[in-house]
Image: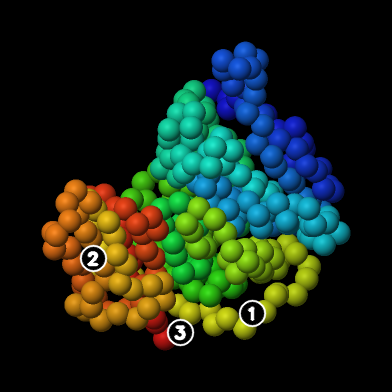
Amino acid sequence: MTNPISATLDFDKDGVQHGFLQLPYSRNDSAWGSIMIPITVVKNGDGPCALFTGANHGEEYEGPIALNDLANRLQADDIKGRVIIIPAMNYPAFQAATRVSPIDHLNMNRIFPGNPKGTVTQVIADYFSTVLLPMADYVLDIHSGGKTLEFLPFAAYHELDDKEQQAKCEAATRAFGAPYHLSLIEIDAAGMYDTQAEVMGKVFVSTELGGGGTSSPQTVAVAKRGVHNLLVHAGILQQALIESEEINTKLDMQQDNAYVFSQHNGLLEPCVGLGDSVKTGDLLARVYSTERSGAEPVEYRAKSDGIIMGRHFPSLVKIGDFMNVIASEVAD
């Protein structure tokens, strides 16, 4: 079945075009309505193609800010090739300020390759898999921690069976120029946009920039610099790299001991902050009962040496919630 999404612009036309990906969606308030996902395409002749996305999860904002900025200022004469900019990939979730779509409650980043006959989120994923990703050489998906996580700002690539492809992903990740970069170990890679792009042989870069359901001048600056530098690295943008005084530190995650999850419901007292150095056995957090006073809190301690790369953001936690991730600095 052909995907029902249609583009209101021409991907092969030179110049700057602003338009929509239009998905028909009949609903109570609009019987013949459509979901209109904003998109910008900038093209100048033949050359590499970059596909940049934000808001794969709807409450992550560095991507939409940096990509709206790029869509406003990028000119065709500045580039050689094509840049496809989608500031809010999961547009229904972005409009609702939620991680997953309020329409079908699916997580965009866990249902690839999608389904042209499926729900709204599955149809959007299928359009990326069958129409957009085949055009792209370089793919950047900008994430942050959303409402429940906060991270040191980093760019990431993955360990791949194809080591030549992995080397290209690592080089692009370094070029992005975040304060930290690493080979990211995913808890559940099945169904991810990352995995779909990598299976199709693309040079793929992901990020985690801040979190807490908001953005900051610092994390937005990292995102804006990163999209610029990745376009330069790809040979698309005919300008110089934007240098940063920040050190591009390489991190490594220990798969067995990197993640700390809560085994209790309660009130979280963080005992370490982002970027803090810890040793095995150091106190990371206490979890207090919210049901009674006078109960001793449960202590969580580090199982490896390193620095705190990510943390749980709200102060209330549930059993199974992520609490911290520990990474170690690597001599580069």
Please name the residue shown 13% across and 59% down the image. Answer: 295
User: What number is the disc on residue 244?
Assistant: 1
- The residue nearer to you, when weighing 302 against 291, is 291
Q: Earlier in the sequence, mark 1 or mark 2?
A: 1
User: Type of residue at label 2?
Assistant: Arg
Q: Which of the 4 image quadrants contains residue 297?
A: bottom left
Q: Earlier in the sequence, mark 1 or mark 3?
A: 1
Q: What percent of the width, then of the height, locates residue 6?
A: 67, 29
* Residue where numbered disc 2 is placed: 286
Residue 95, above or below 142: above
How many marks can you see?
3
Q: What percent of the width, then of the height, locates residue 33?
A: 65, 20
Q: Earlier in the sequence, mark 3 or mark 2?
A: 2
SS at badge 3 = loop
User: Type of residue at label 1?
Assistant: Ser
SS at badge 2 = strand
User: Type of residue at label 3?
Assistant: Asp
Between the residue at mark 1 and the residue at mark 2, the CA separation in whole angstroms equals 37 Å
